[in-house]
Amino acid sequence: MKVAILRFPGTNCEFDTQYAFGKLGHQTVLVWHKEESLPTDIDLVVVPGGFSYGDYLRSGSIARFSPIMKAVVEYADKGGKVLGICNGFQILTEAGL
């Protein structure tokens, strides 16, 4: 399985997430929030925890406007699997997922 792990300013668990999936034998790729597309050959998107954009306003409310989130929503709408951990789940909720 290949896992795309998103990175936002303020996330602090992306490397822990990468390590955990790697220990399970899965390939991982880190995806910066300014990217506009996800890798085409992924099986899972993970939005890790932390404090994206310092959690100003509401948790996840700024991160949801990052360019990569449009691709994440499209991926999910096509049946792709998406996992949000802590603040990552709040970002997904703000994005309507």
Image: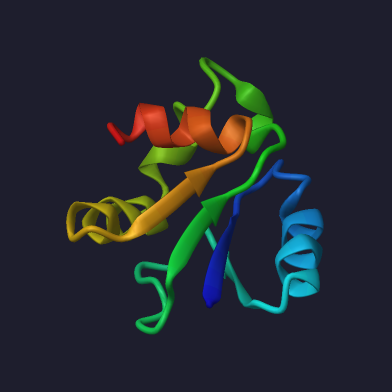
Q: Residue 29's spot in the image, x, y percent?
A: 60, 76
- Is 58 left, or right, of 43 in this rendering? right
Instruction: Work out whether residue 67 or residue 11 is closer to the camera in this orientation and state it.
Output: 11
- Residue at point 28%, 32% (across, down): 96
Q: Quadrant of residue 67?
A: bottom left
Query: Does 90 sit above or below residue 11?
Result: above
Query: Does 83 sit above or below residue 27?
Result: above
- Is 73 left, or right, of 83 in this rendering? left
- Residue at point 33%, 35% (across, down): 95
Instruction: Work out whether residue 95 or residue 34 is closer to the camera in this orientation and state it.
Output: 95
Which residue is situated farthest in the top direction here? 57
- Is 53 left, or right, of 81 in this rendering? right
Q: Residue 44's spot in the image, x, y percent?
A: 46, 64
- Residue at point 42%, 48% (across, down): 66
Which residue is situated farthest in the front direction here? 24
Residue 34 seen in the figure: no
Instruction: Work out whether residue 90 or residue 37 is closer to the camera in this orientation and state it.
Output: 90
Residue 78 seen in the figure: yes
Q: Count how many numbered circles sit on residues in the image.
A: 0
